[in-house]
Image: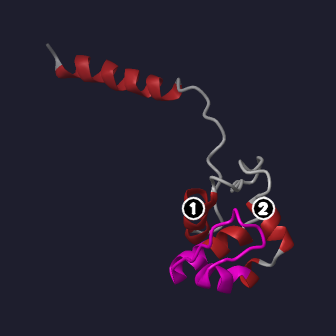
Amino acid sequence: MNRRLIIGPLIFGLALAGCARPPQGPPDPVWPSASAGLGAALAERHCGSCHATGRTGTSPFAAAPPFREVALRYPPSSLQEGLAEGLVTAHPAMPAFAFEAADVNHLIAYLESF
C-alpha cells in the first residue's frame, strides 16, 4: 500500500483531534515569584493544619487567623526575625516554629503576595 495514503489521513486525524479538545479551566494561580510559591508550600505543610494558608477559606482551627489576615495585620518583613528564631505567641495551642534562613525568605515572599 502507498505510504502517502496511510500517513496523510493519519496526520489529518491527529490535527483534528488537537482542535477538538474541550476548553480548559483557568490556569493555576501564578505566584509573583518562585520564592513565593515555595513559601506557599511551606506554609501549607507546616501551618495548614491550623491556619488557612490560601487566598480564601477558613482556618481549620478557629482561633488561628488565616495567613492573608496575618499579612494584613503585620508587615511581613516584621515577621522575619520571629520566623528565624522561633515564633512564640500568647496562646498555648501555637507551637514554637523556627525556620531556616532560606525558608524564612520564601515565607516572607509568600506573605507579601497577599
Where is residue 7 drawn, in percent x and y?
Answer: 26, 23
Residue at 70 percent across and 62 percent down: it is: 93
Where is residue 34 drawn, in percent x and y?
Answer: 55, 68
Numbered disc 2: secondary structure = helix
Residue sitting farthest toward the left = 1
Residue sitting farthest toward the right = 73
Which of these two is toward me, 19 or 35? Answer: 35
Which of these two is toward me, 21 or 48? Answer: 48
**Other-residue count near label 1 (Cα within 10 Å), few / some / many at <14 / 14–19 / ≥20:** few
Q: Mark 2: which amino acid?
A: Arg
Give left or right: position of 17 versus 10: right
The numbered dot on residue 46 is 1
The magenta stretch is: 79-106
* Residue on which disc 2 sits: 68
| Quarter of the picture holding the C terminus | bottom right
Residue 87 lies in the magenta stretch = yes
**Other-residue count near label 2 (Cα within 10 Å), few / some / many at <14 / 14–19 / ≥20:** many
Residue sitting farthest toward the front = 92
